[in-house]
Amino acid sequence: MTLRVAVFGAGGVGAYFGARLAEGGAELAVIARGAHLDAIRDGGLRIDSVLGDMRLAPAIATTDAAEVGPVDVVLLGVKTWQVPDVAQSLRPLLGPSTFVVPLQNGVETVDELTTALGERHVVGGLCSGFCFIVAPGHVRHIGGATFIKFGELDGQKTARVLALRDAFAAARVDAEVPDDIRVALWEKFLLVVPFGGIGAVSRAPIGVLRTPPTRELLERGMREIEAIARARGVALPDDAVARAFEMLDEANPSGTSSLQRDVAAGKPSELDAWTGAVVRLGARAGVPTPLHDVLYAVLLPQERRARGEIAFSPP
């Protein structure tokens, strides 16, 4: 039976992982908009990847999920701050056993989706890999640790998540169903949020950030998030910070986070869902977050300017 997959928000990671599934035999539908959608309709989806280039024509490319109808799996690739607004737009894609795999870097998205769609339609999900749009219809993947993880919120290894894991494996993608997806989400959050915030302030790539003195700042940021996770009862492994640095040290030195790229481009970013979430969750848990307090305060004026809330001319 052919797996039917819809990518809602075909940005860097959504397009990459959706295309890999299609390469492995899945039927792919893409929900996108603007020039990106026009280019996919006209010439297909192009992926330049260190793991092998792809060019394919999705079965459907549209702005309207109702044109696609129910699928087996939805890969949600929109920005974190867009999730509450688009959640209801996913409903035409949902059949009785359809599940949504959120690909956002955050720890609040799952709760937003379950509130909107119900728990049976949502699993926890995360991914890794330096992927970004370089032109309409054209995504580049420059490497780094490239994987996807997903799992039922109650930890059960159900047939549906195992089937998706097997589909990714058939497409030569590193895919895992962890025993506790919430632990995996916090491990990723611990890695990307300090990297994103410090990168946005310094405007430096990972090859620079992982060397002193910014390496010490990265560790301080990770320790703040680790303390919040433990205060909330998340069973992070004792070596969570060391494992995060292993991934950063293996990453392509030219890599940057999506947060950093959006801030640099003057676009709305995931600042509130990343750095802002650390500040909020730390306050609720009674955990001090001095580094993230500063990063959030320093970056907030640029975020508000990108959203049209304030106006000023950059120097």
Image (cartoon, rainbow, N blue to C red):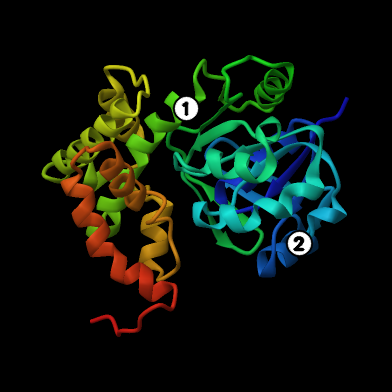
For the point 70% across and 46% down, the residue is 7
Which quadrant of the figure has residue 193? top left
The 10 Å Cα crowd at callout 2, few under 14, some 14 to 19, many 20 or more, is some
Q: Where is residue 74 in the image (x, y as percent from the top left)?
A: 71, 40
Q: Which amino acid does label 2 sit on?
A: Thr
Query: What residue is disc 1 on?
Result: 182
Quarter of the image where the N terminus is located? top right
Q: Can residue 1 be seen in this view?
A: yes
Q: Where is residue 196 in the image (x, y as percent from the top left)?
A: 33, 49
- In the displayed structure, 221 sits above or below 232; it is below
Q: Where is residue 247 in the image (x, y as percent from the top left)?
A: 35, 30
Separation of residues labelled 1 and 2 (CA atoms): 31 Å
Q: Is residue 56 visible?
A: no
Query: What residue is disc 2 on?
Result: 63
For the point 51% across and 25% down, the residue is 181
Mark 1 or mark 2, earlier in chain:
2
Closer mark to the observer between disc 1 and disc 2: 1
Count the numbered circles shown: 2
Q: Which of 293 and 34 lies nearest the eye of the viewer? A: 293
The 10 Å Cα crowd at callout 1, few under 14, some 14 to 19, many 20 or more, is many
For the point 86% across and 47% down, the residue is 69
